[in-house]
Structures are given as C-alpha cells and as structure tokens.
Amino acid sequence: MEAWLSQFVSALLGALALPQVGLVAVFIVAFISATLLPMGSEPAVFLVVKADPGMFWPAIAVATVGNTLGGVVSWWMGYGAERAVEAVQQRTPAHPRAMRWLQRFGPKACLLSWLPVVGDPLCAVAGWLKLPFWPCVGYMAVGKFLRFLFYTAALLWLVPESWFS
C-alpha cells in the first residue's frame, strides 16, 4: 500500500475511533443513506468498529437509529406526496399491482427496508399508502438492525487484517 494511503487510513481510523466523532459520523451517514439518496452506510459502521472493536454494539445501535429515522423521513415524504397528488387530482390515486402487494402485507413489508435499491423507496411507498406509522417504524428498525449486525460482522470476518496495517 502506498505510504500516503496507509497514513490516510490510519488517520481516518484514529479519528473514527473517537466516540464523539465516529458515532456522529455513523449517525449522519446512516440517516442520509436511508433517504432516497444513493449511499451506503455499512462502510462507516465497519470503519468505526474496526478502529475500536469495543464500539461494535454502540455503532450498530447508532446506525440503526439513524437509518430508521431516515426511513421515517422517507415514509413522511411518501405520505406528503400522496396527499399532494390527491389534492391536485381531487381523487385518490390508483394503486398499481406492486402497491397492492404492499398493502396486502401492510407494515410487515417494511421489514424489507434493509434491502438495497428497493428498501428506501419501500418506506416512501408505505407512507404513500398511509400504512400505520408506528408499526412501519418498528419493522423498519428490526430490518435495519439485522442488516447492520449481519454486514458488520461479515466484514469483520471477511476483510483481512493486512488491509489495515
């Protein structure tokens, strides 16, 4: 590894090892990545945990809260968009087949909010369909927690230590 890159990685890991920096960064990245902006939060969680293994559970918890709150914002965006369309058209919008599927499963479908590509829009569609807010939030949180737990543990197991020395 180039010397400058090695120094950069060491400095980044050192900064992320500080709880006041690392957890705030994890929260912000997790929050933003759960809106409709394409961004992954798993690397931020992984780097914090790699820098300080004692931060495993706090980083998972902060990422889950941030990501869930981002999903809540998406839910409210969907809810507001549906209301705006309804007000302009003066009628309830038609629901295509995928939306009918989501209505059939209800808030439990938000358990899939952890999925790449479709998970974040799923939260917005749940708001559009006016699915019950708190059950949706609960299922979002469970799905996102399991995602962070799985991905962080898998990365810790799979990524060789030589990448960080």
Image (spheres, helix red, strand yellow):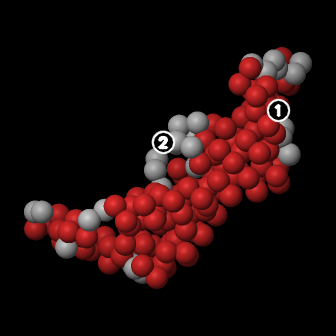
Q: Picture coordinates of residue 107 (x, y %)?
A: 79, 44
Would residue 107 be found to the left or right of residue 4 on screen? right
Inspect this view and state whether residue 36 appears.
yes
Seen at 82% across and 54% down, the residue is: 134
Q: Residues within 10 Å of mark 2 (few under 14, many from 20)?
A: few
Q: Amino acid at mark 2?
A: Pro
Give the camera-side residue of 122 and 22: 122
* Residue 79: x %, y % from top left: 78, 38
Point out the image quarter for the N terminus. bottom left
Foreground disc of the pair 2, 1? 1
- At 34% from the left and 61% from the top, the residue drawn is 158
Q: In the rendered image, which quarter is residue 21 located in?
A: bottom left
Image quadrant holding the C terminus, namely bottom left
Return the mark for residue 104: 1
Left or right of 59? Residue 95 is right
Q: Residue at x 77, y 45 (%)?
A: 108
What is the secondary structure assignment of the residue under circle 1?
helix
Q: On the rendered structure, is 96 left or right of 6?
A: right
Task: Please count the marks in the image.
Answer: 2
Residue at 65% across / 44% down in the picture?
A: 112
Is 59 rendered above or below residue 111? below
Q: Which residue is mark 2?
A: 38
Relative vertical location of residue 132 with respect to residue 44 in this rendering, above or below: above
Q: Is residue 114 above or below residue 150?
A: above
Quadrant of the image occupied by residue 16 = bottom left
Q: Amino acid at mark 1?
A: Arg
Q: Is residue 35 visible?
A: no
